[in-house]
Image: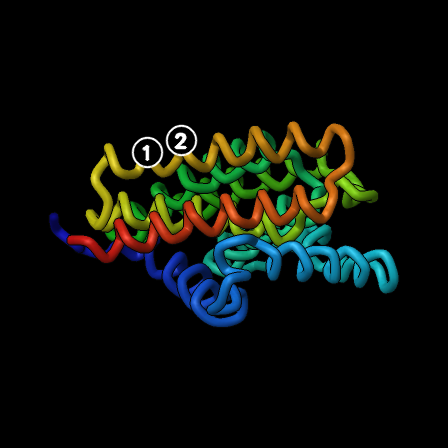
Amino acid sequence: MKTTTTIASLTIIASVILPISTTHAEPRNGKWKNGEGGALREEAILDRLDTHGPLGVWEKDRRPADLERYHILTYQRIRGLLVNGSLSEQQGADFKKTHEQITAELQAEREQGLTDTSRALIRGKLDKLNDDINAVVKKATEGNERTPLLNRKEHRMEELIAFGERSGRLSKAEAASLRRKLASLQKLEERLKDGGISTRDREKLQKEANEIAMDLHRELKDQ
């Protein structure tokens, strides 16, 4: 399969692959497989949030004059709000899809040469997207149902699948299979949240997420 990399993919490589392989890597022992390490870290994250509160940076609606920066900050805002629970999974998916459409338009305009008119058009779409986010964003969820580390993993895997498909590293069938696995994990997550997630539940979810991540990395390397 061909492995050409688009401009849009470069942001994914920088913001997704590097954090997964370093900062958020699982311990290289039995805890990788059974999810214990991830469950403990997630509970530590929740304790920190409850004790010190969220940083709040992603709740801010920042619209800089520089169009490229505005485009990047909007995506980072969606990701941050989704991870901390201020957006539902469906809302996050819808906003990411809209942002992907804007990204495709921006890339096409870059190739032809951005004009004042095209810049204004894209800025208007980013403004509307942020207005739509403001209309539904809520305070980060509180309580035992939060899964910030799992949400982050799921989001990054979604990004990697999209990158793999765009770059030709994943076939459409491979990408569809991985997305079905992620959807199944998210359904399990929602089901467990109904009763309040225990440490054992977190371990189960982390284990499932790790297995999908390993499948994903295996498919990306198998060319």
The amino acid type of the residue labelled 1 equals Ser
Residue at the outermost right position: 51
Residue at point 47%, 71% (across, down): 22
The amino acid type of the residue labelled 2 equals Arg
Q: Distance between the residues labelled 1 and 2?
A: 5 Å
Quarter of the image where one finds residue 138: top right
Q: Nearer the viewer, residue 99 or 214?
A: 214
Quarter of the image where one finds residue 176: top left
Colour mapping used in the image: rainbow
Residue 132 vs 170, above or below: the answer is: above
Q: Which of 128 and 174 is in front in this view?
A: 174
- Percent position of residue 30, x then y: 51, 62
* Residue corresponding to mark 1: 177
Residue 119 vs 96, above or below: the answer is: below
Label 2 secondary element: helix
Disc 1 packing (10 Å; few <14; some 14–19; many ≥20):
few
Residue at point 52%, 68% (across, down): 27
Dots 1 and 2: beta carbons under 8 Å?
Answer: yes
Residue at point 38%, 51% (across, down): 160
- Percent position of residue 94, x then y: 53, 31
- Position of 23 with respect to 41 (left or right) is left
- Residue 213: tell me if it is visible: yes
- Residue 78: tell me if it is visible: no
Label 1 secondary element: helix
- Percent position of residue 199, x then y: 71, 48
Residue at point 47%, 51% (across, down): 210
* Residue corresponding to mark 2: 180
